[in-house]
Image (cartoon, rainbow, N blue to C red):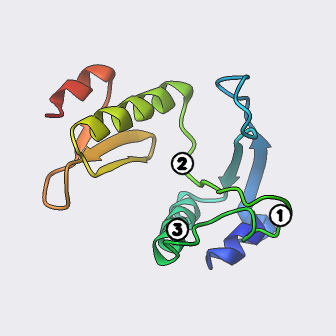
Amino acid sequence: MVQLSKVIESPLTCDDIQCVTRVAKLSPNNDRPRAIVAKLRTPRLRDTFLAAVSKFNKAHGDDKLSSQHLGIGGPRVPVFVAEHLTPTAKKLHAAARVKAKELNYRYVWSRYGRIYVRRNEESQALLIKTTASLNLMH
């Protein structure tokens, strides 16, 4: 976490990190490594950290965050940093991404455990609370 924070230029100290753990996979057959969940000292630190990851990836469009940036040897593997969602919210987020792709929505994101979609920069964001909310997208 500290190395990642240096790479994205949003420095954290060990005191800023309260807890780091791995979580179980939703699908045991998946060959990707288990997700790592880190709890930071304050919500503001978390939001700043997530914004810095997004900023880093936008600034490095051809060289997004990967294992090489963190000094991990072996093949280059992308590193994804996102808000931790409950399994239910994770499934809803996946369903929203599928529906958004079908309907040519440009943005799907989560903030504070809630899922949002937006067709383009000018349109209003829609809050997706349940799978029934996906029908509001058209």
Nearer to us in this view, 17 or 132: 132
Name the residue tied to disc 1.
Answer: 72
Judged from the image, the secondary structure of the residue bearing numbered disc 3 is: helix
Cα–Cα gap, marks 3 and 1: 24 Å
Q: Specify which label sits upstream in the sequence, 2 or 1.
A: 1
Of tags 3 and 1, the one toward the viewer is 1
Task: Specify the label residue 119 is tagged with.
Answer: none
Query: Can you tell which mark lies on residue 83?
Result: 2
Dot 3 surroundings within 10 Å: few (below 14), some, or many (20 or more)? few
The residue that disc 3 covers is 48
Q: Are marks 3 and 1 in contact (CB under 8 Å)?
A: no
Q: Is residue 124 above or below residue 64?
A: above
Q: Earlier in the sequence, mark 3 or mark 1?
A: 3
Residue 31 falls left or right of residue 128: right
Tag in front: 2 or 1: 1
Most distant residue in the top direction: 132
Q: Nearer the viewer, residue 120 or 90?
A: 120
